[in-house]
């Protein structure tokens, strides 16, 4: 969908204002990003970021409560817990909705394999050339799937890493990558240098999809990979070096006040 110059500038001004309002330290305390921010060691941050993102669907309070549950299981030492293999003795408890201990173990086996060979997920992403791909998010997941599958006896687990990469919006992975790659010293951590902020994609879920349609940015109804590409292309025109700063605006608009029918002024 093509926006005329006037509409584009009005939209950009509106999103700039909303992103600046929502991208604030206060945002951290009700968002899953808070858990990765508790740690200083890169590997701890990586484990917690990907686990928190893996269960990031549903109500935010439930997501946050269940992130706390995972940290408690890992005794608040994620990297050591992964490397020592303590998770293998964990009974098959429920962690979050349809995410169980078996899914948790699947991810930790994959992390352990990557840490043992590459040292960190950031160095793994460098090794496989994620930053050189035209679509780093999807390429990185493809490469992670290979290692995770090998670490789990050849099995795949779409609860942990999406398998339908041709169509998936990859919302949870794109959110984790925003946390890890963006660094403006406010909310996101910016601990990765394997991918540039300019290469990130918008984390697209139902709410963000509804928002971009209400704003007249797209007409497509599906919340899929193609829509992610179309929305991110528009955001890159607005801020080429940091398109997903607008995730704060697109996600935050209406949270708590049931927005529908946005008025751009």
Image (cartoon, rainbow, N blue to C red):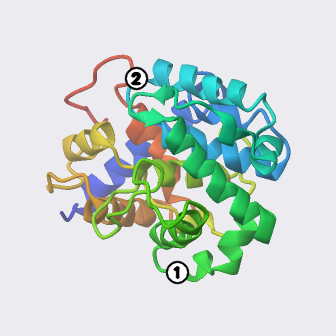
Question: What residue lies at 26% left-to-right and 60% top-to-bottom?
Answer: 227
How many neighbours does mark 2 have within 10 angstroms: few (below 14), some (14-19), or many (20 or more)?
few
The circle drawn on residue 51 is: none
- Residue at the location (58% across, 30% down)? 91
209 left or right, relative to 92: left
- Is residue 160 found left or right of 253 in the rendered image? right
Give whichever of 157, 201 is nearer the camera. Answer: 157
Q: Position of residue 257 (x, y in %)?
A: 33, 17
Residue 9, placed above or below residue 92 = below
Q: Position of residue 104 (x, y in %)?
A: 56, 41
Residue under label 1: 133
x and y percent of residue 68 in the render? 64, 23
Q: Would you place residue 208 above or below residue 254 in this image? A: below
| Residue, disc 2 | 59
Q: Secondary structure at mark 1?
A: loop
Disc with the residue nearer the chain's start (1 vs 2) = 2
Vertical placement of residue 248 versus 137, above or below: above
Q: Is residue 88 left or right of residue 16?
A: right
Q: Is residue 241 visible?
A: no
Task: State the residue at coordinates (28%, 62%).
Answer: 5
Mark 2 element type: loop
Mark 1–mark 2 Cα distance, whole angstroms, equals 33 Å
Image side of residue 3 versus residue 58, left or right: left
Residue lying at 25% horizontally and 32% vertically, measured from the top left: 262
């Amino acid at each position: 969908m093509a926006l005329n110059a006037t509409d584009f500038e009005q939209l950009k001004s509106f999103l700039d204002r909303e992103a600046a309002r929502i991208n604030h330290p206060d945002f951290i305390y009700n968002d899953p990003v808070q858990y990765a921010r508790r740690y200083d060691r890169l590997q701890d941050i990586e484990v917690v970021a990907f686990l928190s993102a893996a269960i990031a669907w549903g109500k935010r309070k439930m997501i946050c409560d269940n992130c706390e549950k995972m940290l408690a299981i890992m005794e608040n030492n994620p990297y050591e817990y992964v490397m020592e293999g303590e998770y293998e003795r964990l009974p098959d408890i429920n962690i979050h909705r349809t995410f169980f201990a078996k899914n948790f173990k699947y991810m930790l086996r994959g992390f352990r394999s990557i840490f043992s060979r590459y040292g960190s997920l950031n160095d793994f992403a460098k090794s496989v050339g994620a930053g050189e791909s035209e679509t780093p998010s999807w390429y990185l997941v493809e490469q992670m799937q290979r290692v995770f599958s090998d670490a789990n006896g050849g099995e795949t687990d779409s609860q942990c890493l999406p398998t339908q990469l041709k169509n998936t919006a990859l919302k949870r992975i794109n959110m984790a990558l925003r946390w890890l790659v963006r660094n403006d010293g406010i909310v996101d951590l910016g601990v990765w240098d394997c991918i540039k902020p300019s290469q990130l994609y918008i984390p697209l879920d139902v709410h963000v999809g509804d928002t971009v349609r209400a704003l007249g940015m797209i007409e497509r109804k599906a919340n899929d990979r193609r829509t992610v590409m179309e929305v991110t292309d528009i955001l890159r025109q607005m801020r080429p070096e940091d398109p997903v700063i607008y995730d704060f605006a697109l996600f935050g608009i209406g949270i708590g006040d049931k927005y529908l029918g946005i008025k751009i002024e």
